[in-house]
Image (cartoon, rainbow, N blue to C red):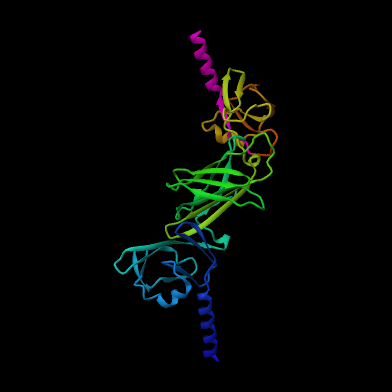
Amino acid sequence: MKLLIFSLLSAFLLIRCQNPRKHWTLLPNILVVEVDGTLGQQPLSCLELPEERLGEHNRSLGIFWKKNGALEPQTGNLYMVQLVESLGGGNYTCHSEDGSLLNYTELLIHQEDQDSRRILVKGGKEDFLNCSAQSYSGEFHCSWTWHSSRVGKVAFVIAERFSSSNSTQCSLDANDRHWICLSANGKVNCSVDDNERGVSCLDEQHCPYAEEHHPIHVTVFVRTKHYLLESYSKLFFMSEIVKPDKVRIDRVNTTVIEWSYPSSWSKPHSYFPLTFQIAQLKGGCRRCESLCTAVKPSKTVQSTDGCQFKVKHRTKAVCVRAKDAFCNSQWSDWSHITLKKIRRNKVKHNKKG
């Protein structure tokens, strides 16, 4: 009985291993195989031969294989990659009898279980990708954080205006740094940052004056030196990720501050108004930006032009930030100025006078 159980189990494993996995081509000569943690195999072909010749001549062609530069025992036109959990990825090359390179395939392993992803770590908002835009120009930036022990590199980027019937084609330049994605809904260009910690994109057909009908869908494929591939996606409208630059405080005196719109913000300001929040600090501060976030704003104003504000008596510092007046989007980072600096500037001005 034990022998029968063992035989059945062995037969099941054999059949399971012979079944090829779901796979797809990321780039020419780069094959991605989906794994689910169980045993499996993935066939690789060196030369494209008719099916009737594969079995007959597989081992008579004098072809030998290498994995990551090391000679493999398997020979012939067909090579079977053994897949065990997330192992099996590598750079597979096939050679003729005289050692000449005939073909190569870089095999990347992609786990079907998205909860097992571990190349990137979640940011402060519990998202792997954090995206923001300085205005409604169509430019946006998505950043991420590498795991401290699994720093990898970007393998591919897909950015598109998403719809159910969308068919997007993305191409990569020769330097592996710039992607162009074309679809029926537009054209999006993306470039990877030099530090591999983000990607900057431009939706070339985005109209800032029109309502967005399709969200932007960004997918970043990252890989490690161990040929493990993971994908991370984010879906958003520009209005959801817009975050103005810091407000610039232009002119002050002992009782009044004045600030203006960030130069990068969309124009005209009457069509893209900002809401401003002001916080006043009664105590001095060495790190005012951190204190700005801890103090409750004393006033909220909306203006389509520069604003003036009279500070309260004994106020030591003033903080100002802005956000889109019409959307529930992000506030800008705080700008601040200390009254000590204000008084010093006034004294200098009086001396010059």
Residue 268: image x %, image y %? 65, 26
In the image: residue 258, left or right of residue 199: right
Residue 66: image x %, image y %? 36, 66
In the image: residue 152, left or right of residue 254: left
In the image: residue 28, left or right of residue 266: left
Inspect the magenta stretch and tell me whether residue 255 lies in it.
Answer: no
Residue depicted at x 39% and y 62%: 103
Residue 106 placement: quadrant: bottom left
First to last magenta residue range? 330-353
Q: Nearer the viewer, residue 237 or 19?
A: 19
Residue 227: image x %, image y %? 44, 60
Question: How many numbered marks have been drawn onto this rendered protein structure?
Answer: 0
Furthest-top residue in view? 353
Q: Nearer the viewer, residue 4 or 286?
A: 4
Q: Is residue 124 something that shows in the picture? A: no
The image shows residue 279, relative to residue 86, as above or below, that is above
Inspect the magenta stretch and tell me whether residue 336 lies in it.
Answer: yes
The image shows residue 232, relative to residue 342, as above or below, that is below
Residue depicted at x 38% and y 76%: 59
Residue 187 placement: quadrant: top right
In the image: residue 206, left or right of residue 155: right
Give the quadrant of the N terminus: bottom right
Residue 76: image x %, image y %? 38, 73
Q: Is residue 215 something that shows in the picture? A: yes
